[in-house]
Amino acid sequence: MGNDSALLLGMALTGCALVRIDPEIEAQFEAAKTEATVQANAIRPHIEADLNALSAYPWMADRTCVRDASEVLHPLFGFEDNTYIDQGLLPPPSHRGPAAKALRKAAEKWRSAPEGAHWMTQGADPEVQAQTLPWVTALRDFDCWDITAHSPWDQVDPVALDFFPNPGGQTLFAASMLLLMQLHVPLDHPTQSDSERIQQTLADVRRLATLCIQSQEFITARIGANILQREREAVEHLTAQGRAPVEWHVVPKADNDRLYRLLTASPAFANFFTPLKHRELATSTAFSVGRCAGIREGTRVSMAYQGLIGDERLEWLNGVLDQSASLGCHHNDIRYLRARPEKRLANHEPFTNPLLTPAMRQAEAMTLAATAIPMYGAWSDYEY
């Protein structure tokens, strides 16, 4: 018998089966709830102000995906950004190819700009200029990205509830950087003017940002906000060159910051520690930006504790997930995982140890939840 098993056996025999939760653990769990309430009360007015400001950008708002880019993106790049796939713990999509790796390698040139030089000056590099991205043209017919369509989520290993495959948002960021860097060199072409090319490229980059935001995935949506930041920096550079299109309007830094902090904190609006008085935010029509990404991340993490922590909060989260489709969210992946009990923590070590009493299992889960869940988006992440 290993040391851990002996310790657990000793606890079970000497603790009268631990019929009660350790008061310190219970206090830690309740403290996490209380802290979330304090933070939410302070931050809620700022959230509402930011949502009001972002209503000026209807293309940022969550919506039911009809013109879906997944049919182009998923066969092309797969889900190459997932650590479990990269480590060989999950099978890669059968269609995963080398295109993304070559593209991202060339895009990294932006980090090598000489000190004091704008990163767009790297567009003069022959490797950057040599990159062609015909699939970007194909994306002009789409305005959203359902990451659950044409995707490998049915291949997810049972232990991987916390590591669901992520789409290739970093590849779209790399494509945006390449397109913007290439603009540094003025176009000399008989059939298209330099100004027309700049206008079209900025529109393509904006579309890549929109697709990331509309992916409704926690990490990928924030990549979309980063693309908007680089678009703004590129327009500033082109303005200094006297080449920026007058009619192009970037998202101001203040609004981009609003978008990023909404997306960063959004899982706090729909997770185990969401305060009762703020729960309606998750399904409110006023919460139109970042809501679906928040519900996906918050419910994905919190529902792992089903069968370990009996709490009405999990019932509420199940209700939120049931409503999400009517809110314009594509959460087929999370509903699929919810229906698979083998993917919950309760069916994996250490919770399957037969020496753990129900109270010990619950105490272990409460300790883990109080520390882990706030890591996946917390009210305190809302830096205003």
Image (cartoon, rainbow, N blue to C red):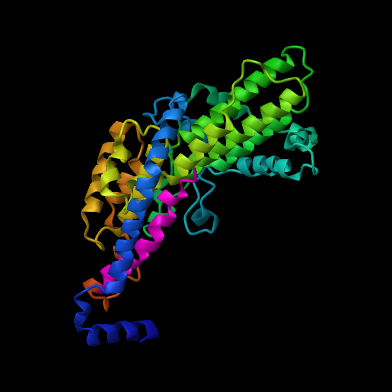
Q: Which residues make up the magenta segment?
A: 360-384
Residue 5 horizontal/vertical position (percent): 34, 82
Q: Nearer the viewer, residue 48 or 170?
A: 48
- In this orientation, which residue lies closer to the viewer: 193 or 135? 193
Q: Quadrant of residue 247?
A: top right
> Quick check: 225 above or below 142?
below
* 297 falls in the magenta region: no
- Of residue 359 and residue 4, the one placed in the foreground of this image is 359
Image location of residue 309, percent across then percent down: 25, 62
Q: Is residue 343 visible?
A: no
Is 7 above or below relative to 372? below
- Percent from the top left, x then y, of residue 323? 26, 37
Quadrant for the N terminus, please: bottom left
Residue situated furthest top in the rendering: 191
- Please determine whether, in this image, residue 132 is positioned above or below residue 341: above
Q: In this image, 34 relative to 110: left or right?
A: left
Q: Residue at x 52, y 32 (%)?
A: 255
Instruction: Please identify the quarter of the rendering in which residue 197 is found.
Output: top right
Q: Residue at x 41, y 49 (%)?
A: 379
In this orientation, does residue 238 appear?
A: yes
The secondary structure that dominates the magenta segment is helix
Residue at the spot x=66%, y=32% of the render?
A: 233
Is 383 magenta? The answer is yes
Q: Is residue 197 above or below residue 62?
A: above
